[in-house]
Image (cartoon, grey):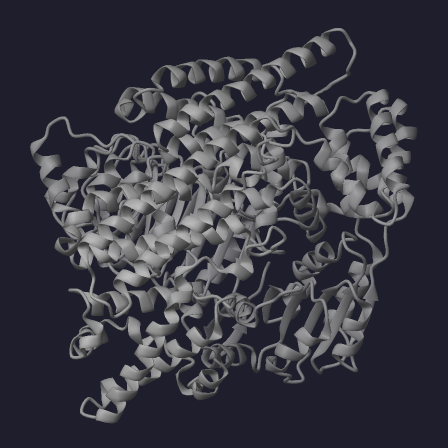
Amino acid sequence: MATLMQKLKKPQQFSEIPLFLEDPDFEDFWYHELMKNKNFETFPGHASLIQFAALQIKEKLSSNYDQVIYLLLENLEASAWYMYWQYNSRQDYKEFSKILLLLLQEIGVFFTVPKQQLSKSSTYNPPDEIVDFFIDFLLHILQEIHRIHPDFIVSVEGSIEVLRNKLGFLLNFLGDTPSLHPSEVNPLTHIEAVLNEFGSFLYSFFFVRNQVQAPRMDLELSNLLRNIELVEAKIKKHCIVVSNMPCCTTRKTAVVSLIIVDSLLDDLTHLLNHKADQIVGVNDQIVTLHEELILLRSSLTDITLEQHPQLEELLIQTTDIAYEIEYIINSFPPVWYLTLRLPQFMDKIKRIMMGIKETKKNIDTGIVEVENYPTERVSLQEKGPLILEDIVVRFEETEIAEQLIRGPKHLQIISIFGMPGVGKTTLAKKLYNNPSVVHHFDKHAWCVVSQTYNKRNIFADILRSVKDNDKEKIMEMDDESLVEALHKSLIKWRYLIVVDDIWDTNAWNDFGRYFPDDKNGSRILFTTRHKEVGLKASHHSVVNELPILSDVECWELLQRKVFQKEHCPQELVDIGKKIATNCQGLPLAVVVIAAVLEKIEMKEHLWHKVAISLSSVISEDPNKFSNILELSYKHLPMHLKPCFLYFGAFEEDEEMSVKELTRRWVGEGFIKKEEGKSSEDVAYEYLVDLIDRSLIQVSKRTSLGRVKTCNVHDLLHDMCLRIGEQQNFLKEVQSFKRPKIYIWSDENISISALTQLKRLVNVRYLVIPFMVPQMEKFHKLEFLYVQNGTEVEIPDFLLEMVNLRHMIFEGYSRFSKSCSRRATEDEIFQINNLQSISNLKISNEMEGKILRCLSNLRKLKCSLEEFQDLSFLNWLESLRLTFSPMHEKHLISLPLNLRKLTLASFYMSWERAKIIGRLPNLVVLKLQDGRFEGHKWNTTEGEFQQLKVLKLSNVLVKEWNASSDPFPKLEQLELKYCNLKKIPSNFCDIPTLKMIDVHHCQQPIVESAMQIQEEQRDMGNEELQVIISSYTYHNSQRVPILYV
């Protein structure tokens, strides 16, 4: 072995090249080269199988396998490269053949379970996962043999099919609860032995140079099947043994959500009604299981609002058993295994029912005391600015603002340091938005560094802020172009860059040199936990310490949070001051504890309990601040706990899309079904509740005021991780044994990833780069995001999936021809499930008819290539239309219930524009990359009666004439890259107007916006903001226009 290792050298020149064996252009070449050598054709298709196995091994290779194999594959890749480009070289072909023969000699290691990883103490690769992985590898080899030459194994095809099913069962058993518990039977050892036997069978028959003999193959297959049946007997004995052990409990999920029970009941109903042929022999037991679960569900309904450790434990046990049953039911194991497991499930349910009965009895008799969760509904109306932004203005803000505006002309670093949660980021935000600071600097940008940072993402964030570029365009730049664009966008300008949460000077040394110093007073503002970061970053830096709040400031802040503008009742003053003092001067602790007090009754004895809890955790040093924050988690209702802990699955300081977050919550099963509301709406209510409790921070809002993105404070993120680890929460939601959420992480198509996808019978939220085979098996799928780069055809089965509600395609998609025919010919054809489709292309009237079958569609983004009447989409609330090619005929009629409309690449006459103006429920209108006939837009009285937000971006209109009573409810006007002469003067008369936002427009628009603001102020509207976020040009001179 040592000699072989010495001969092989890793070809460094190919280390950055993708595996050449995977190149489709090379596939035929390699196959024919192998065919020339009789050593590689011991059965029809042998050469192709070797090729397939090499790809499999390369893909599945890990550092735990023999390094010889890895070097062989690397050398084989290099040799193949040379041979391909120097086709007539006998020496290269000889070298290629020699390495391949060596590979075949060493390849046998892959046909046995890796011994060095089979250890119960293994941290990274548990034994069941290693065996799972190995079964998958063998099944792929078996499948490829059948694909290459099915006639060759026809005599043993029946045995191979039985073998495939039995291996599939072993794979599913490794995900079931009994496999996780040890016993003297130790089935994993027996499974490993039979898998090694099967691996030896495949290797000896299909990879060595002996001729394959069918009779011998049949005999060995028969022996192998008998041995698997013996393993099944061992599994049966093991399941019986561990079911009687006290330690044999279901894996703790810590996800208290009864939606999983509802989902399981639906699964059982579907199984009994539509797949009864698969459960012959256990039908009655499944009916009984269904009835027992209904009783359990009704028993739990009464206790979900009560808070007590015993009740919470019963809810966790219920969730656990529901996940366990769901896994088995959807894995379709053999009937003998169901006969074994179903009674065990019912026994566990009965024990939970007994626990519920006993706990209720104790509660009724007063033996145990419970606390009720607050029953008030969450208000979705904004209660006012987020309290973290309302921390009392201290002298630090004024002092640091002076440091930013005054001081030396050279580029200077100003640092704010202090302990976590003291308000550094909050103070930086106030400075960033301070009018005097905004007016002083030409360009402004904000970036977050954190402990683990990505330099490219930091530059992209800054560039988006200072150049107003699309994120997609920026991310397409290579590193050199990105740095160059950043430098060009800052040079010659006076800029302010906030670098939030920087941990050490290494980060600044890594990217700080790219910021130009033009001696014009530019500033970098740090927030950091460490004083030395500011001191070491520059010799001229200014370091400011942000101290903790005094007891008086803590009490003022707590009162403002709990009572808003009201006074604290006298009986709560003393205990309130004690609570404020116990927050130890930390603003974050004050607001989260205040949020707890907000949710309970204003009674002295209840506040006293909070004070006692605070006093006890403070005494438990050294983690007193973490313990204070954990009190807020302990006071959360059960349904909010998994939603909050889920933030630990995201990166620190990550800004999360609310749409994606709430859809994930739905996919995970955290959201309770409520009559008359969509799951996403209920999830949004949960989020607002967490925001009201000051556990989540709002990052951005939509034009209508809804939360668009959010984030969580570092300390609270740490708390999510800590509690999630203690309760096994994050491990469960990220488990690949039975995932509800699957996001494709491989850049390239991989066979193992495809195999894993095929087993996702319970997946609800799926993100993939392409349409995968057998997706129709994902009968629970609710959300599908396809990251396609090119146009794809939507498979018919997707439209028939009863639970699929949202489809998003990154590139365009179109309906199939067969679907178009059905929509045209079948009068009863309906698609009742889909609520939203994004990036759909409609090319003709026949495809447009499919839209008529989407009876529940609420949101649509599509491109029209031909005229379409869309007025029949009665339930549609949000519509984005892109016209290709731009043509006035496209727009004839629109759905009357539209609340949000976006038109892109349009050409519109005045008459067509009236179609939009007459929509009775339209609240948001966005016009992009289009033009009006004659470059004029005339809006008349009676139009746009409900419109609150109007945005025009790159719209060719020079003259805008509005009626005497235009847009009576308009709140926000945004103009971007527009060449208007001016904003209509009668906008001065709109009493609801709150914001005019102007980007990259000419000076006359800026002047008219300021004139409107001045006249609105004269009429008493002090709330109107005019924001000019870039530069205009007037008389060939640069005129900086800033926030007003």
Q: Which quadrant of the rendered structure holds the C terminus?
A: bottom right
| Residue placed most toward the observer, 208 or 608 | 208
Residue 308 percent across, percent down from the top left: 72, 22
Left or right? Give the position of 1019 relative to 567. Answer: left
Residues 750 and 938: in front is 750
Residue drawn at x 44%, y 88% as measured from the top left: 7
Q: Residue at x 25, y 47 (%)?
A: 160
Q: Nearer the viewer, residue 853 or 401?
A: 853
Residue 709 as seen in the image, left or right of residue 717: left
Relative placement, left or right, of 814 versus 736 is left
Is residue 700 something that shows in the picture?
yes
- The residue depicted at 18 percent of the width and 65 percent of the height is 43
Give x and y (percent) for residue 426.
71, 54
Q: Is residue 247 above or below residue 659?
A: above
321 lies left or right of 165: right
Q: Looking at the image, can residue 1018 be seen?
A: no
